[in-house]
Image (cartoon, rainbow, N blue to C red):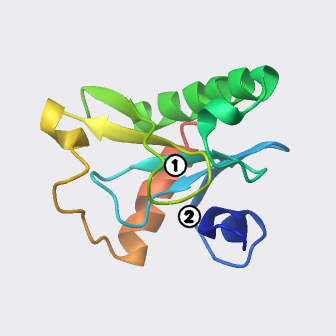
Amino acid sequence: MASVFTKIVNGEIPCHKIAENEKFLAFLDIMPLATGHTLVIPKTEIDYVFDLNDNDYSELWSFTKYVANAVGAAIPCKRVGVAVIGLEVPHAHIHLVPLNKVGDINFERPKLNPSQNELLDAANKIRAQLA
């Protein structure tokens, strides 16, 4: 059965897309820890990020850096934090979370519940920063 992220890649589930190329996709988390919380995934469904072949692994991190720079430029924060957890969705993914303090990347704290308009606004701000 396809993961929820594969369904997003295939267009079966909508998302607020930030960036995309032939191998990778970045989109906003709909239950974010902070405004601008972005997920970066390989389009190929692979359960664990460390199972990617070396070339795809390196390319994923380069794509992630490109997206993280846009997130940091668009969303007021001190840093863009990175987390690779992968317990909830069996599809490799990297979390990019705008941070102002260490606790901002605590995945056990309550998530935000932004409206579609708030998500769209954040996505537009981040996309505007992509070079």
Q: Left or right? Give the position of 92 relative to 106.
A: right
Judging by the rendered image, the residue that carries numbered circle 1 is 39
| Placement of the N terminus among the 4 image quadrants | bottom right
Task: Give the residue type at disc 1.
Answer: Leu
Q: Looking at the picture, how far across and down is residue 87, in whole percent?
A: 44, 52
Coordinates of residue 70 in the picture (x, y in percent): 51, 34
Which residue, given by chain and number where applicable, does mark 2 sit on? 16
CA neighbours of label 2 inside 10 A, class few (<14), some (14 to 19), many (20+) = some
Q: The residue tagged with tag 1: helix, strand or loop? A: strand
From the viewer's side, name the closer residue of 33 and 72. Answer: 33
Q: Position of residue 97 (x, y in %)?
A: 35, 41
Near mark 1 (Cα within 10 A), the count class, few <14, some 14-19 or many ≥20, is many
* Mark closest to the chain's N terminus, 1 or 2: 2
Give the residue drawn at x 78%, y 69%.
Answer: 10
Q: Is residue 24 above or below residue 27?
A: above
Residue 104: name its quadrant. top left
Return the x and y of residue 38 as percentages of the image width and height.
47, 48
Asked if 67 appears above or below 28 in the picture, the reply is above
Tell me if residue 28 comes above or below residue 73 in the rendering.
below
